[in-house]
Image (cartoon, helix red, strand yellow):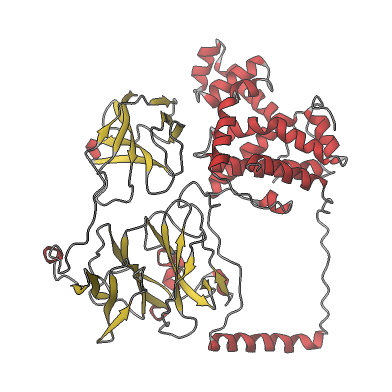
Amino acid sequence: MSGYLDRLGEQLVEAAGAPRPEPGRRAARRSTIPAGAAAVVVALLVASAVALAVTGTFQTGSPVRPAEHPVASAGAGVATRGTRLLPIRAADPGGGLPWGMRLVHTTRGLVCIQVGRLSGSQLGVLGQDEAFNNDGRFHPVAPDVVDYHRSTTEISNCLPPGQVTSQEASIPQNGVFGAGDSADSAAIPRSARRWISYGLLGPDAVNVSYEREGRDHTLPVDPGTGAYLIVLPTSPKNGFETGGGATSSNGFVTPQGALSEITYRVNGRLCSESRPASEAAAAHRKCPALPFETPFGVPTRLHHAIGVRVAANGTAVVTFTAPRAVTSAISGYAVEIPAPCHKGTNEIPVERDVRAGQLIHVPIPGLFDNACGPSVSVRVVYEPSREHIPDGKGDVIVGETTVRR
Amino acid sequence: MNGSSRPDEVLLRATRDGEPEAFGEFYERRRALVLAYLRSRVLDAETAGDLLGETFAAALLATRDPERPIPEEPAAWLMAVARNKLIDSIRRGRVEAMARERLALQRLEIDDQDIARIDELTARTDLVRSVQELLSADQHAALRARILEELEYAEIARELRCSESVARKRVSRALRTLRAGLQAPE
């Protein structure tokens, strides 16, 4: 089977042989509607739009596609066949299309959560509240619109398999995550905002409890995944201001924000974790610990040679030979440049698959930008589980060197 | 089948005159050079591959446009197109697909085997030597010092044992050569 470069060549040859488009000469479309009827048509369209809004049915608009072309072996990867819409529906407090959730399994081993409005079996966002020029249409969101970096301001969160998460966010009713950060968000009235509480609590979760308008509610989670979705008209009393959440590798997350309690079934028995009254109380769990294997040993040093080529303007390229393959987003390499005077480390991750033995080049925009003296330390680290919390455990230091200005 | 010894300019003219395989030959001949340049300027092989597609698509659009002259130095022109596409992608934070869309090219996936191929092809291509073929010796030395080694003009002048203004002129001439013909396509 031919690869990308060959297929591109074939496409170009095919395009070179296709009939040549005539630039600047577009076929003029002539309206067949008599002038006198135009006002009637416009009135009908307006009436239809009102009817559509009332019934919650929207015409379909342009689909939302990833900001960058998704690549199977880099970043979050691309959606695989395991991707599915979950049988979860949450009514919107203002009516209209319900909310739903999709689980996207990617080629790089991640499980990503997408939340949005539902039109039939399609997940998407609405062209209202300053989105899509207020076109009043439903815009389907492609499964590949996922974000590798966790953020409540994005439409999705990605996790490695086995991790559990509970997230909260204040977003516009159109379903567009991230709009809270934009300048246009001030134009969105409070009544057009929603508080979204959603998560993936794992196979041991049974239900979640939350309070709405002074009454306690209990919602069963999706069996098997532990997925849940709650849509509230306003932020909860004990919640975050704009959003937040928790992610865990040990099977449990502490209820927070809108959630007052999470019930699990552990060893055949039900137990519930309540929202802790304080940080100290959060350490005392009611449920017995789930069997969780820590796959990490003592950090190791391989003492491999790494090369650093520095240009006059401070940009640099770090070169190393990858001792281990990377086949998913869960593991990976990174170049670290510690800056002890700033109490931090500049980390440049290599977010793509690599072969064992492959020569890797990592461009560094400003090698000395955070330098604490005339030289900087540069080290290449292999992270066997990038998503493990806390970070750093089990890292393998491939090699390190010192570079002088 | 036409021989592979035809100059680039002849291949582009043949493409315009209705021989699509000629553009395939041009692509085969120059893709490694363009890829090596792009790969050295972007973080990953996928982006380089994506930009490669957009570069050649833009070049094909320009070649097929009868109102544009066929460039006298097609390889240098192609590098300038690639550079423009690269700059556009940096400004916009993404690789545009405008040229490919105008040609109705289907978006192609880049898998890990493709990445390995791109990296392999890039590693095998001596970018410096390839660029050298396009320029005179003094232009090449000045351009290499300025673009690849990113030296200041004063440093280039010291290295080439000429005045700073001569160094500037050589770099300028080299860039002009690389831009030759260039009404680079959008």
Q: Position of residue A223 (x, y in %)?
A: 36, 73
Query: Residue drawn at (68%, 20%), measured in percent from left and top?
Result: B133
Instruction: Report the quarter where the C terminus of chain A lies.
Output: top left
Does B115 sit left or right of A301 as displayed? right
Query: Residue drawn at (32%, 29%), measured in percent from left and top?
Result: A399
Query: Residue drawn at (32%, 80%), measured in percent from left and top?
Result: A219
Q: Position of residue A186 (x, y in %)?
A: 42, 71
Judging depth in this view, the residue of A242 and A36 nearest the camera is A242
Q: Residue furthest right?
A: B17
Classify A216 as above or below A284.
below
Classify B183 as above or below A177.
above
Query: Residue drawn at (59%, 23%), measured in percent from left and top?
Result: B126
Res. A112 image quadrant: bottom left
Q: Position of residue A278 (x, y in %)?
A: 13, 67
Classify A226 as above or below A366.
below
Q: Position of residue B176 (x, y in %)?
A: 68, 28
Judging depth in this view, the residue of A12 and B43 nearest the camera is A12
Does B155 sit left or right of A271 as displayed? right
Does A345 sit left or right of A317 as displayed? left
Classify A332 as above or below B26.
below
Res. A327 image quadrant: top left
Does B156 sit left or right of A249 as displayed? right
Q: Residue furthest front?
A: A268
Residue A81 seen by the camera: yes
Res. A279 image quadrant: bottom left
